[in-house]
Amino acid sequence: MKQKKDVLPYYVAGVLLLLGIVCYGAFSAEPPKEPVRQMFTCVAGKVLFTHKTHTAESGYGIACADCHHHPEDAEESLACGECHKLPEDGSAPESCEDCHEPDDFEIADMIKQADALHGQCIGCHKENGAGPEECASCHVKHSF
Amino acid sequence: MLSQKKFIVSHAPFWHDGSRICERNHQIMLAALPALIAGFCYYGPKAIGVAALAVSCAMLWELLFNWVAKRPESVGDGNAALIGMLFAMLMPATTPWWAVVTGTFIAVIIGKQIYGGIGANPFSPPAVAVAIMMLSWDRMFDFDEMLLNYELGFPMIYPLTALKNFGVDAVSDFSLCGLLMGRQIGGIGSTFGLGLIIGGAYLIIRGFIRWEISVSFLAGVFITALLFNFSDPVKYGGPLFHLFTGYTLIGAFFLATDDSSSPVNFIPMLLYGALGGVMTVVIRNIGVYVDGVIFTLLIINLVNPLLDKIRPKALGK
């Protein structure tokens, strides 16, 4: 006698597939406007920066303009990389030319992103006597 | 000589206790459910999406292979669903959909079906998938980076990454009780230690997995971590920390106990588990990976046929 085929697993697979598609579609990975944490990637190893802990009143309460310092009167802060990430061909970042004429600034004066972040982080940590200052205290060599 | 009796069988009626292969897989899924549900509670609908897609894709890959290979449809045995579920439990909640589709393909087709299907796979299929994914897309297993935008009310750093890079001081904010209750980031279903222990104990009591493997695996982790911790308490984490973090518990109860890739005799099971536990901590403490469980599983799966050569003495000899 031929055994009757159990169709339940096929229905379960179909329903779960639909559920998966709906969850992926409805809850897309759109990052929040103000990041909770940021991962800076570089040759020396990744650095996990607790952005919200630094900005929240319950955290260190640092004002946006203390880090996102330019331009001072901007309604929305520019990300560090918009200015400090210099194109390899030696040209100026696009964000500079949004406000400045090409003759108004020297690209050689612009600090590279790594130096800017090092200066910002270590400078502030030293100034306040809090937070890590050594390379190995922030940079992660083994990440998975 | 031809009339010599070699095998005698009694006549019908025979008795069958009603258990089938699908019951075993369904029971393992049931045991894994508390840890998975805890993951859903922490990570929300994204985690549900990963798990649902992984289970359904694993079943569809199995069905597709059945059709292509002209074999009987085996979706109903629940093994593909179990593989999909375990794969999802190891992944972060923000795993992209294409990674779930690719990972389940690797687990079901490369990890199981090309060896001949259920019972013939030499490696744990979810471990094969995660190992290949880990080497292909390493950033997907950097839980710190994958879960950047979650705030769950506990330290949002992956404990094993913090320990390996910054030493024991960096993980002092984690309490053992919190780790056991899943208050740590990681794979969707691999952080809620209590749920995994309860699920594993249930499977051991019901006889679906062997206690020898799980207990010796955990003992291997505990003793090796303890020795390392004695040698340098500032650099190496304590034994309980290693037990309750990373993939240790899901590996000990749900991955190392995969029936076709683990030994069947008592002494080999103890050696297999203990080797897994020792290797896990050795990789974590002096290897380059923060969590050695997945690669450990592949190594002990590889050693499994050799260990099974250690057999009890035959009766009458």
Image: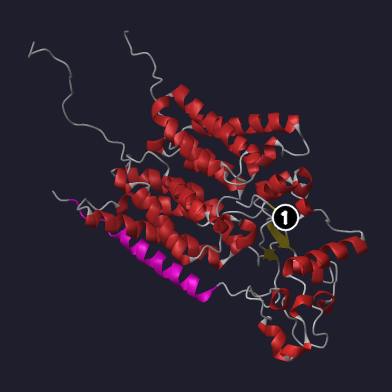
Residue A26 vertical placement versus B245 (above, below): below
What amino acid is labelled 1 in the image? His
Between B231 and A90, the one lying in front of the other is: A90
Evaluate whether residue B78 shows in this view. no
Q: Residues in magenta?
A: A3-28
Give the farthest residue toward the left.
Answer: B2
Measured as percent of width and height from the top left, residue B36 is found at 53, 54
- Majority secondary structure of magenta residues: helix
State how the image is colored: secondary structure
Residue for badge 1: A139
* Residue found at x 38% / y 56%: B105
Evaluate whether residue A41 shows in this view. yes
Bin the neighbour count of mark 1 within 10 Å (Cα to Cα): few under 14, some 14-19, many 20 and up.
Answer: many
Q: How many marks?
A: 1
Measured as percent of width and height from the top left, residue B235 is found at 75, 39
Q: Is residue A39 magenta?
A: no
* Residue found at x 54% / y 29%: B274
Residue B277 vertical placement versus B84 (above, below): above
Q: To which chain does the residue with label 1 belong? A: A
Q: Is residue A6 magenta?
A: yes
* Residue found at x 76% / y 43%: B168
Location of residue B304 (image quadrant) = top left
Asked whether, in this view, residue A44 is left or right of residue B89, the answer is: right
Measured as percent of width and height from the top left, residue A104 is found at 78, 89
Residue A22 vertical placement versus B64 (above, below): below
Residue B131 vertical placement versus B314 (above, below): below
Asked whether, in this view, residue A58 is left or right of residue A78, the answer is: right
Between B192 and B116, the one lying in front of the other is: B116
Between A138 and A33, the one lying in front of the other is: A138
Label 1 SS: strand
Between B97 and A119, the one lying in front of the other is: A119
Quadrant occupied by the N terminus of chain B = top left
